Image: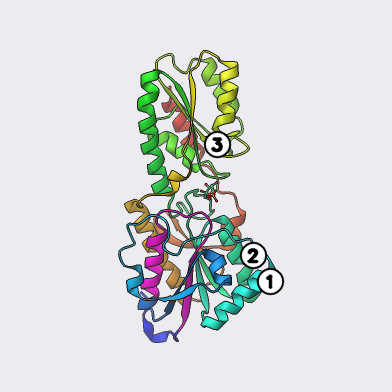
């Protein structure tokens, strides 16, 4: 651990931005405490980039982050901020940071938030470190993002419950899960809940394979069938697929459930709390090492630092072994 001696009094601002994710609070706590131990002043910035522009900033002590590790959501609140996408908005944010004497930022968020961070850091030569906070798990260079494991467990619990009613009525259910343009939640949720199929944007042929599954008689040896669908224009969403199936196979009793924002809530799992704590502490190490424009990631249980350009621009691949496993086990 890096200690106080070789550090001038520096000041770090922390913000959460974009869609909230369970474990963001654990990350805020970890950054605050590790930074205070390292001799930084810590500032909590409210409502993401919005609060940075409107100067909603307060100094944090260790007490500000007491009793939050177990709470979902984010005590800093969050927003999607249009103004920060403009040069004027970013200039305003920079001026506010200067006024508070804040010389570095930790941004906790997903792809859009880290894109904003990268532009800002380059424009003003400002030190920014990112933490991957999103349930979508769609950031390249990290095996997991903060919130993903909790959302996956929520999906699994919901699908378990839907299966009870699906079985009683011998129905086919299309269950839509979040992920924006990524299929990690749908695919792993399907494996965890023992679903018959997952329709994800990364694998275009899945929709045709669904036809195949249905033509072969989904229900021959089963009294319910569950298909997880990733929300995305590419998959057509659960509603679109259900309509298609109803028209083509009128014998099937089809229902749709869209899990929606409940996937973003709830107390974080132990995995997400530990991940967020490790990543938060690692973000402070990165600040001390004068790293900039990097996202903290985890690879094979080791902390890694991924340049923003790589984390944001590269598409994180789906492991084909997972899809094969799902197919082999859904007979
Ligand atoms: O990025 C997280 C996420 O939950 C996506 O899975 C989803 O598409 C999106 O945010 C929903 O955003 P909002 O809460 O702004 O509707």
Q: Earlier in the sequence, mark 3 or mark 1?
A: 1
- Residue 105: tell me if it is visible: yes
Q: Position of residue 283 (x, y in %)?
A: 45, 68
**Display colour scheme:** rainbow
Circle 1 sits in a helix, a strand or a loop, which is it?
helix
* Distance Cα–Cα, label 3 vs label 1: 38 Å
Where the C terminus falls, by quadrant?
top left
Query: Foreground mark, 3 or 2?
Result: 2
Instruction: Determine whether label 3 and label 1 are within 8 Å by CB.
Output: no
Residue at position x 58%, y 71% in the image: 53
Depth check: give the residue in front, 282 or 248: 248
Q: CA distance from mark 3 to mark 2?
A: 32 Å
Percent x, y for residue 63?
A: 32, 72
The location of residue 242, given as percent across then percent down, is 55, 25
Q: Magenta residues? A: 10-35
Within 8 Å: ligand 1 and the Cβ of disc 2?
no
Q: Residue furthest right?
A: 87
Query: Contact (CB < 8 A) between labels 1 and 2?
Result: yes
Q: Which residue is mark 1?
A: 88
Q: Is residue 15 magenta?
A: yes
Above or below: residue 253 compared with residue 303: above
Query: What label does residue 331 carry, if any?
Result: none
Picture layout, residue 276 above or below residue 258: below
Q: Residue at x 52, y 75 (%)?
A: 104
| Residue farthest along the left direction in this orientation | 67
Packing grade of label 3 (10 A; few <14, some 14-19, many >=20) is many
Q: Position of residue 55 (x, y in %)?
A: 54, 74
The mark found on residue 83 in the picture is 2
Return the residue at label 3: 200
Q: Residue at x 52, y 44 (%)?
A: 179
- In magenta segment, residue 256: no
**Residue 206 visible here:** no
């Amino acid at each position: 651990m890096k200690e106080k001696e070789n550090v001038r009094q520096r000041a770090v601002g922390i913000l959460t931005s974009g869609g909230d994710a369970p474990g963001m609070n654990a990350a805020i706590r970890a950054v605050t405490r590790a930074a205070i131990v390292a001799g930084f002043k810590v500032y909590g910035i409210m409502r993401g980039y919005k609060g940075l522009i409107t100067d909603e900033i307060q100094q944090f002590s260790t007490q500000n982050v007491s009793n939050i590790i177990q709470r979902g959501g984010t005590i800093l609140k969050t927003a999607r901020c249009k103004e920060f996408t403009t040069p004027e908005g970013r200039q305003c944010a920079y001026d506010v940071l200067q006024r508070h004497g804040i010389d570095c930022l930790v941004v906790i968020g997903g792809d859009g938030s880290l894109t904003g961070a990268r532009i800002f850091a380059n424009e003003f030569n400002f030190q920014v470190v990112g933490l991957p906070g999103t349930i979508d798990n769609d950031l390249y260079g990290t095996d997991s993002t903060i919130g993903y494991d909790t959302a996956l467990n929520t999906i699994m619990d919901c699908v378990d419950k839907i299966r009870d009613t699906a079985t009683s009525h011998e129905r086919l259910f299309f269950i839509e899960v979040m992920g924006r343009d990524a299929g990690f939640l749908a695919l792993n949720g399907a494996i965890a809940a023992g679903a018959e199929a997952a329709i994800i944007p990364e694998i275009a042929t899945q929709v045709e394979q669904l036809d195949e599954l249905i033509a072969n008689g989904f229900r021959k040896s089963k009294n319910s069938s569950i298909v997880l669908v990733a929300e995305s224009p590419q998959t057509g969403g659960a509603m679109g697929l259900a309509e298609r199936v109803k028209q083509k196979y009128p014998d099937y009793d089809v229902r749709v459930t869209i899990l929606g924002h409940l996937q973003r809530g709830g107390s974080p799992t132990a995995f997400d709390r530990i991940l967020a704590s490790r990543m938060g502490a690692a973000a402070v190490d990165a600040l001390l090492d004068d790293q900039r424009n990097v996202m903290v990631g985890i690879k094979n249980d080791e902390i890694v630092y991924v340049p923003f350009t790589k984390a944001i621009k590269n598409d994180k691949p789906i492991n084909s072994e997972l899809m094969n496993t799902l197919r082999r086990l859904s007979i």
